[in-house]
Amino acid sequence: MGKVYVFDHPLIQHKLTHIRDEQTGTKDFRELVDEVATLMAFEITRDLPMEEIDLKTPVSQTKGKVLSGKKLAIVPILRAGIGMVDGILKMIPAAKVGHVGLYRDPETLKPVEYYVKLPSDVEERDFILVDPMLATGGSAVEAINSLKKRGAKNIKFLCLVAAPEGVEEIKKEHDDVDIYIAALDEKLNEKGYIVPGLGDAGDRLFGTK
Ligand SMILES: O=P(O)(O)OC[C@H]1O[C@H](OP(=O)(O)OP(=O)(O)O)[C@H](O)[C@@H]1O
Ligand SMILES: O=c1cc[nH]c(=O)[nH]1
Ligand SMILES: [Mg+2]
């Protein structure tokens, strides 16, 4: 059964408040999303396997722990997920990056897939799927379908702001996927936007609108 983790770390909450603020412009919005992604990566990598190695410090022989070479892939849901990739790569620079292109039809709110490119060794990798927004959950569920169809077995979903509806949708369709959220908001409005949310993440990241 997948778990839901909501981060209450003060640094994440502080930065998220500025991300939400409509006065925050594109440059600051992009930098803050990048910083929060780095902080969240710190937490989602908590269970990475480690191994012990021998080494010598300037003082003595000792043993130390290093990551044991788990193969990871970060997959942003285009477009807005791109804003979280570099922040995560700062923590796990050896990860490969795939892409799933989806947009949400503004009338039906259903996801429309337009691009998929994943690392070739899909079955050997653990996946971190990223998108700042989890609203109805349609896009995340479709992206997870897409990864699983190509052989992905272990998937975590990472987002900044989620609506309860989106969390329930992932749990219903993919109860093996752990969900990591910076904030769980109140609800969706009649246009499918998260309330209070932060508006359209893609438009705010890339200055389109
Ligand atoms: O949970 P859902 O109801 O599916 O909504 C969430 C999706 O909507 C936004 O993408 P959008 O369709 O605006 O595409 P964009 O990133 O290209 O702007 C967001 O980045 C998610 O992918
Ligand atoms: O609130 C929302 C919902 C979907 N997509 C966004 O970018 N924001
Ligand atoms: Mg958008």
Image (cartoon, grey):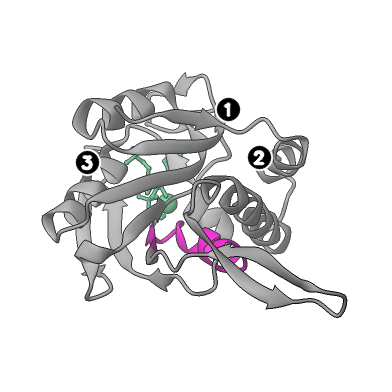
Query: Can you give x and y, in whole percent of width and height, for residue 143 in the image?
Result: 25, 51
Distance from Cα at disc 2 to Cα at disc 1: 8 Å
Query: Can you give x and y, in whole percent of width and height, for residue 94 in the image?
Result: 49, 74
Q: How crowded is mark 3: few (under 14 residues within 10 Å), some or many (20 or more)?
A: some
Give whichever of 38, 91 is nearer the camera.
91
**Mark 2 or 1, nearer chain start:** 2
Residue 175 visible? The answer is yes
Please, which residue is most extreme toward the left here? 149
Q: Which residue position holds label 1?
A: 196
**Mark 1 or 3, nearer chain start:** 3
Query: Can you give x and y, in whole percent of width and height, for residue 56 in the image?
Result: 74, 78
Mark 1: secondary structure = loop
Name the residue type under label 2: Arg
Name the residue type under label 1: Pro
**What residue sits 73% from the left and 50% below the top?**
24
**What residue sits 58% from the left and 39% below the top?**
198
Give the magenta range: 73-91
- In the displayed structure, does residue 13 sit left or right of residue 52? right
Vertical position of residue 151 compared to residue 121: above or below: above
Give whichever of 73, 46 is nearer the camera.
46
Name the residue type under label 3: Lys
Please, which residue is most extreme toward the right here? 59
- In the displayed structure, does residue 15 sit left or right of residue 6? right
Name the mark on residue 20.
Answer: 2
**Mark 3 or 2, nearer chain start:** 2
Residue 106 visible? The answer is no
Mark 2: secondary structure = helix
Q: Mark 2–mark 1 contact, CB under 8 Å?
A: yes
Distance from Cα at disc 1 to Cα at disc 3: 21 Å
- In the displayed structure, does residue 103 sit left or right of residue 17? left
Q: Which residue position holds label 3?
A: 110
